[in-house]
Amino acid sequence: MHYVYILQSVSHPERFYTGRTSDVNRRLAEHNRHKNEFTSRYKPWILKTYIAFTSKDQAIAFEKYLKSPSGRAFAKKRL
């Protein structure tokens, strides 16, 4: 499975991060252990939501959509 996930910063609740992985728990732990330069500034992170896809291509397309202006508006309103 391939997952698109949205994280929310605990220390800066207005900050969100969208990513893609095949292991959500491992990736969340990496974000909270300084494995990503951007997310290390706003740690700790909690998992807000994730969506599973059987196709890697679908996951990539949905992640790209969520990072677009209309996708961010969708996520803010619906997820």
Image (tube, rainbow, N blue to C red):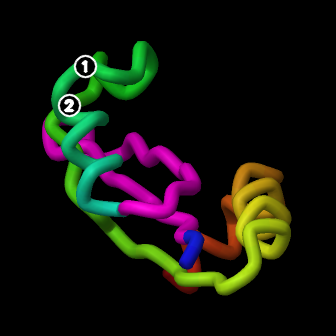
Q: Quadrant of residue 44?
A: top left
| Relative side of 10 to 36, left or right | left
Q: Which residue is drawn at 73% across and 50% down?
A: 67
x then y, percent, for residue 43: 20, 31
Of marks 2 and 1, which one's residue comes earlier in the chain? 1
**Residue labelled with disc 1:** 34
| Relative side of 7 to 52, left or right | left
9 shown above or below 58: above
25 shown above or below 53: above
Q: Is residue 71 visible?
A: no
**Residue labelled with disc 2:** 43
Q: In which quarter of the image is residue 37?
A: top left
The type of residue carrying mark 2 is Lys
| Relative side of 55 to 52, left or right | right
Q: Which residue is drawn at 54% across and 51% down?
A: 18
Residue interval drawn in magenta: 3-23
x then y, percent, for residue 7: 37, 54
Element type where label 2 sits in the image = loop
**C-alpha distance separating marks 2 and 1:** 8 Å
